[in-house]
Image (tube, helix red, strand yellow):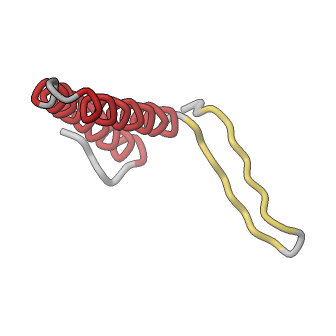
Amino acid sequence: MINLLTPDGRRAAAFAALLGGCGVFTIFAAVGVYLVSGNATYSFYLALAAHAQIMLGLTAFTALFIKRHISVGKDGVRIEDQPRAD
C-alpha cells in the first residue's frame, strides 16, 4: 500500500501513474496508427504526436528523480537542481 502522506509515497504514486499513462497512450497510438494506415499523412502526424507524447513522459520520469529548490528574493530568482540522494 502506498502511503500518500510521505514524499516517497507520493513519488511512488506519481511513478505508477506516469508508467500506466505512458503504457496506455503507447497502445492507443499504436492502434490509432494501425487504423489510419491507409492514409500516409494521418499516419505520419499521429506517429509524430506519439513521439512527442513519449518524450513528455520520459521528461516527467526524469523530473521525479531531480530535487529542485526555487527561491525568490530581492536579488532575483534562484533555482537549484540536484540529484535525489534519499
**Which is nearer the eye, 1 or 61?**
61
Q: Residue 77 appears at what percent x and percent y?
A: 78, 63
Residue positioned 25% across, 35% down in the render? 42
Name the outermost residue toward the bottom.
Answer: 74
Above/below status of 69 relative to 35: below
37 sits left or right of 75 in the view: left
Residue drawn at point x = 37 percent, y = 32 percent:
48
Give the residue at x 21% y 32%.
29
Q: Foreground residue, 4 or 52? A: 52
Q: Quadrant of residue 54?
A: top left
The quarter of the picture where the C terminus appears is top right
Tell how many labels: 0
Q: Residue furthest right?
A: 75
| Residue 16 pos. (x, y %) | 27, 35
Measured from the top left, where is residue 10 in percent x and y? 35, 47
State the image coordinates of residue 57 (x, y, percent, origin top left): 39, 36
Q: Is residue 60 left or right of residue 39?
A: right
- Which quarter shows the N terminus? top left
Q: Residue at x 33, y 36 (%)?
A: 45
Q: Would residue 80 be found to the left or right of residue 57 on screen?
A: right
